[in-house]
Structures are given as structure tokens and as C-alpha cells.
Amino acid sequence: MEKKNCLILALDVTDRENALRIANEVSEYVDSIKVGYPLVLGEGLGIVKELAELAPVIADFKVADIPNTDRLICEQVFKAGADAVITHGFTGRDSLDSCVKVAEEYGRDVYVVTEMSHPGGVEFFRPVAETIAQMAADAGATGVVAPATRPERVRDIRKIIGNDLHIISPGVGAQGGSAADVINAGADWVIVGRSIYNSDSPADAAMKICNDMKC
Ligand code: C5P
């Protein structure tokens, strides 16, 4: 993904009409559009191809299964036109290797969740976040997902992965995180959903976040 605005839209609406309207309105401000279960379950995987015409799509399926099932999921995601997939890491190195292998075959990217951004994200993830980050680096992932709600954790994770891997960071706005703070802490991109798609003017909301970050 090319870095222009350091902003990824989390498009968690559930219908095609709204999804395309919002994506069109903000496309000049975002480097990628993250699509997850809400929209794909609402409209089918075909929405990925439509959105990919506006910006590269990250498929946030938080893939977390045995290697063979992970392989099948990643193949479907990339065939559908997604530029990248988000996987979990707690399923182990063999599962992650399977996703990275498919991504390499298709020339696409893999981001691994290290610690989630919501309050419950500290319960089970925090003790293993560094280990998952190291595994993501060892496995050749493109980058990791780390919480904008806890910029200090982004700093910790950056120390582990160095500068070769990217950090994409959700939790700005609706979850309380500040885009500027987490970019200063070492994130490459912020991921923003509700603060943009629930705004009366998604384009203005996206532009404001870009201006705040000065990335
Ligand atoms: O609406 P909001 O800006 O809070 O959206 C954040 C997005 O990032 C959601 O799509 C959520 O599923 C996702 N996400 C997250 N924390 C993670 C990984 C993904 O909030 N660790």
C-alpha cells in the first residue's frame, strides 16, 4: 500500500449503497479501505471488487484457523480482489506461514493482529503481543495491527519489529485514540471507522484527520 495520507477507512457499514457512497466521498483522503465481516456478510464478497476500483482493499477477516483452512480463506480473499488480509497470530506460526505463503503467491500483503484496541484487548492479548509481533516479523508478514488507544504499546511493538514491518493502527476517534499521537508513536497508518462513516460529511471528517496527523 502506498503511503500518501496515512489513513485507512474502516468501512463497517452493512449495505452496498452506503458503502460505495462513503468510499467515493473519502477516496481522495484514504490510502486503503478496510472491509470486514459487517459489510461482506451484508453484501457478499463481490463488494471487495467494487471498492478495489476506488482504493486498495484490506480484508479484515482476522483469519484464525488451521493452516489448510487459512490457506483456503486467503485464496478466496485475494481472488476477490483484496490487496491485503488481516490475520490473527495466536493460532501459531504454521497458520501464519500458510497465510504468508498464499499472499506471496498472489503478490499481496498480510497484517497480523498483535493486540486489540478495545478495553478487553488487554485481557488476553497484552501478555502475548510482543511474541506475536516477533513471530510476524520472523514469518515475513507485511505488518502488524496495534492499538491507537494505547500509543505506548505501538512504541513497544515498533521496538520489536523494527522498521521493516508496517504498523496499521485502529482505535482513533470513536474508541478514544488520537491519530497524531499514534503516528508519533510509530504507526504508519491509522484505521478509522465510525468517526468517518457516521459523520454528516465523511470527506470533511477524513480531511480533518489527515490535517491533524500531518503525515
Ligand atoms: O469505528 P472504529 O474507528 O472504532 O473502527 C475500528 C476498526 O478497526 C473496526 O473495523 C474494528 O473491527 C477494527 N479493529 C480494531 N482493533 C483491532 C483490530 C481491528 O478496532 N485490534
Image: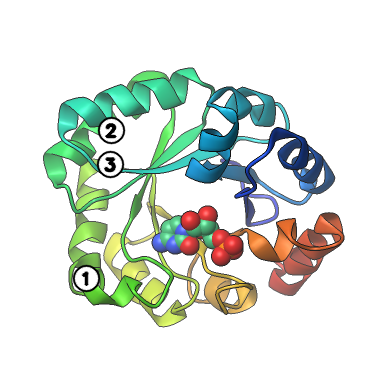
Q: List x then y, in percent, for residue 132.
A: 22, 58
Which quadrant holds the N terminus?
top right
Q: Is ligand 1 within 8 Å of the beta carbon of the residue shown at mark 2?
A: no
In what element is the residue under mark 2?
helix
Is residue 107 among what the camera can see? no
The three-letter code of the residue at mark 1 reads: Phe
- Residue depicted at x 73% and y 67%: 209
In the image, which disc is placed on residue 124? 1
The three-letter code of the residue at mark 3 reads: Gly
Q: Is residue 203 above or below residue 171?
A: above
In what element is the residue under mark 3?
loop
Q: Is residue 57 left or right of residue 111?
A: right
Is residue 198 among what the camera can see? yes
Q: CA distance from mark 2 to mark 1?
A: 23 Å
Q: Quadrant of residue 85?
A: top left
In what element is the residue under mark 1?
helix
The tag earlier along the polypeptide, 2 or 3, is 2
